[in-house]
Amino acid sequence: MCVYVCVSSLRCSGPKLKSCMLSSVPVLSWLPRYSLRDNAIGDLISGISVGIMHLPQGMAYALLAAVPPVFGLYSSFYPILIYFIFGSSKHISVGTYAVMSVMIGGVTERLAPDTNFMMYDNATNQSMVNVLARDTERVKVAAAVTFLSGLFQMLLGLVKFGFVVTYLSEPLVRGYTTGAAIHVIVSQLKYTFGISPKRHSGPFALIFTVIEVCYLVPETNIGTLVVSLVSIIGLVMVKELNTYLGKKLPVPIPVELLGIIIATVVSWQVNLEGKYGVEVVGEIPSGLQPPVMPTASLFGQVIGDAFALSVVGYGIAISLGRIFALKYGYKVDSNQELIALGLSNTIGGVFQCFAISCSMSRTMVQESTGGKTQVASALSAMVILVIMLWIGALFEELPKAVLAAIIYVNLQGMMKQFMDIPTLWKSNKVDMLVWVATLILTVLFNPDIGLAASIAFSMLTIPGVVIFHSSATLYFANAEMYQDALAEKSGIDITKLISQKKKAEAKRLRKEKKEARKAKKDAKKNAQDWVRRRSGTEEIIPVLLDYYAGNVLGECLMDDPSMSCPVQEGEPDSSENEVEKGVATVEEGSKPDSTLPRAIILELSPVNFLDTVGVKTLRNVSRLYALISILLNLLTCSATGVIENLESGGFFSEKVSKACLFSSIHDAVLHCQTDRAKMNKDDEVKHTNTHGHDTCTTRARTHKHVYTNIHTHTNTLTLFY
């Protein structure tokens, strides 16, 4: 009997197999339903724009990983195609990323330092580095750690371990990326000054490197420094121009592409390498590399680095993925994202790529230029393919100082995160402590050791709470689970409802535009007929016709009262009525669903502390449910500390006042009943079909008031109908 039960539970029916396939390979579910009319143009423009960004960023971040620039192009091609097939986010742009690259660079320089590849040059009687042998070994190290990190991500995804990222709170992630950005800047100083400092490893390596750079500053190559300064100033100026003209430009100015093109041409014409000793990129082979299995003997030496890479890369990608999923009303599967990134890194490691994640700058460009699906990412990969096959060799004279300048400028956003400190000081001092401690630990130690130490410190700041217990407070590690439990127990699929609302709004706008065009066309035709009848000729002055077409709905310029006007005064235009009817129909259908609750009461009696993530979670829940006309009320918030946390965290606003706080279920329910009675009375008095968008002004129901308490492992949820 036991054997039969086990076997039957393992049986796979057709629908189950199909569902499993669609969830494991998301491209099979959305690509057959891809709308060319709605998405193709936006994805094409977005794909080309992001592909252009991949070229300079891929080459620049390859320097961070301490591998030849062409391998940055490989990392901007193979992993993107894999993510296109298996990823669940529609908007993020995966590929090379500064933080991941500097972590890989630490591994490659540790296992393949310059000192291991010194050779004696008989011509100069000096020792020099065998660059070819060194780069070959570093590529092997990068491929091995990337392959192993991909295996970790796949394993974590298969065992449904996606929640591991919940231990990376927002203050921790922002402090960590700021600290990693400092590592990135210090690692590029040698290309800016044209010097060759020794490579340091272990704790305090960054401090030793800065001291070494300061010691070598008198040996600065002036030509390299000038190239660096000019590049930085030019990039910053054009980026600021992009920001200033952001709304006026259809696509951003490809400042990085223009920068490397101009720098390459100048370097080639002036011979910067020969005359001034400016280091250039060097040989960029055309074509693609054959697949090579990573060196297994290296796995034991990089296993710790690989796990850190897998966690950091996933944390950054899933954070951005959820932001855009929430904005556009779809859901990102955290475990599927782990598998997608794992496959991207594993297969990428076979093709000698280094570990990838999601880039904020490229993602913002992909979204702002009209990208709506991962087709945009696939098209950007095609742009990189064209560059690798035919164009890459043209950039061999590109100075490495320009690539370092691109890295500096792209780190502006991370450096601005220092402004988090005064903000967190005002809202939550514990989160500020986590942010500062994470920054210090990451700067003093390597990014991988710093991450582990930061997580340990962050866990010490949690007020004695275990994530899975019912008495847990609402903090960064269980914020996502809290929202999931709320959605599951209330039966409200918020992302689906918001998506439906956005689609209905888009449909309404399209219909309005269509009707407006039709009305304008009819008005122009009526004006044309009127002018012809009045003039008695077929010849019409275009300017006069345009004037009549634009003003025919307002007034008629008639000298002869016997002539009929195309639209008589006081007679409404039929096309205008049709537009109004269409709009009225949409508004009538957009009223709150009668099956949804009017209000949700969250019992927060177990909560005695709220960090910034907890406050942001409640603020997002309130905002999202307000979009579908459901009011949020908080119960048992009499604790002074919780109210202070809500105030300092910016929970209250013009739309959300302290009137949503209650000390008992009785008071909260009475408030909801009073609100409902008032709204129902207004509906009866008005007798109108229009409804408010931000309030619960829906038609009255005849059945009795009902409220239901649903107890979960994290909260008590009260739904009021």
Image: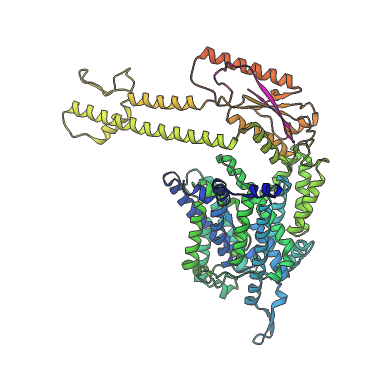
- Give the side of residue 112 with respect to residue 518, left or right: right
Residue 162 versus residue 486 in the image, above or below:
below
| Residue 162 screen position, x and y as percent | 68, 49
Q: Which residue range is magenta in the image?
A: 699-721
- Give the side of residue 521 with respect to residue 373, left or right: left
Which residue is depicted at the point 57% across and 40% down?
327
Hey, which quadrant is residue 528 in on the image? top left
- Give the side of residue 297 with respect to residue 79, left or right: right
Q: Does the rendering let one see residue 577?
A: yes
| Residue 273 screen position, x and y as percent | 57, 73
Hey, which quadrant is residue 98 in on the image? bottom right
Query: Most extreme residue toward the bottom, as rendered?
Result: 122
Q: Does the rendering let one see residue 228?
A: no
Residue 601 versus residue 542 in the image, above or below:
above
Q: Nearer the viewer, residue 384 or 337?
A: 337
Which residue is depicted at the point 34% across and 20% down?
572
Q: Is residue 709 magenta?
A: yes
The quadrant of the rendering that contains the C terminus is: top right
| Residue 68 screen position, x and y as percent | 60, 69
Residue 458 versus residue 135 in the image, above or below:
above
What's the image's color scheme?
rainbow
| Residue 35 screen position, x and y as percent | 44, 45
Residue 58 versus residue 167 in the image, above or below:
below
Q: Is residue 157 magenta?
A: no
Q: Nearer the viewer, residue 204 or 460?
A: 460
Q: Nearer the viewer, residue 177 or 501?
A: 501
